[in-house]
Image (cartoon, rainbow, N blue to C red):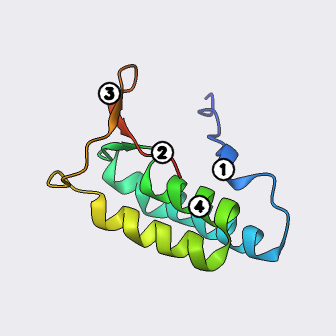
Amino acid sequence: MQQPPKKTYKEATGNKNEVQYLFSGLFLFYKTFFSSQDMTSCTFTPSCSEYGILSVKKYGLVMGGVRTMDRLTRCNGLSPTKYEVDMKAKLLIDKP
């Protein structure tokens, strides 16, 4: 029986310090055990968890955390802000 290919997340690689390792580990734990349960229902690209890890890597723990919390408040169908649409994936684009 052939195993399905193991999914890798490029967001969780290239860590430069302990905080990035910690958040990458939390990201992988969330993606493996929780996010996989809700299938592909996220309306954004990158997904909220991917956005969170990219924000922490780019802006640091405090500002990245604030930006992630802001993103989570906008992650709904009633968000008034207009976003570009990735026509290939048919998802809204929200860059960290």
- Residue, x 29% and y 45% (percent of image)? 41
What amino acid type is highlighted by mark number 1? Answer: Glu
Q: Pointer 2: what residue?
A: 46
Circle 3/circle 2 CB separation < 8 Å: no
> What residue is pinned by disc 4?
55
In the image: residue 21, left or right of residue 46: right
Could you tell which of marks 1 and 4 lies nearer the N-terminus?
A: 1
Q: Where is residue 40 in the image (x, y as percent from the top left)?
A: 34, 42
**Looking at this rendering, what residue extends furthest in the bottom direction?**
62
Closer to the observer: label 1 or label 4?
A: 4
Q: Which mark is residue 23?
A: none
Q: Is residue 23 left or right of residue 67?
A: right
Nearer the observer, disc 2 or disc 4? 4
**C-alpha distance separating marks 2 and 4:** 11 Å
* Amino acid type, residue under disc 2 in the picture: Pro
* Chain-order first, disc 3 or disc 1: 1
Residue identifier under label 3? 90
Image coordinates of residue 33 in percent, x first then y, are 48, 62
| Image disc number at residue 11 | 1
Q: What residue type is labelled 4?
A: Ser
Task: Say what secondary structure mark 4 lies in.
Answer: helix
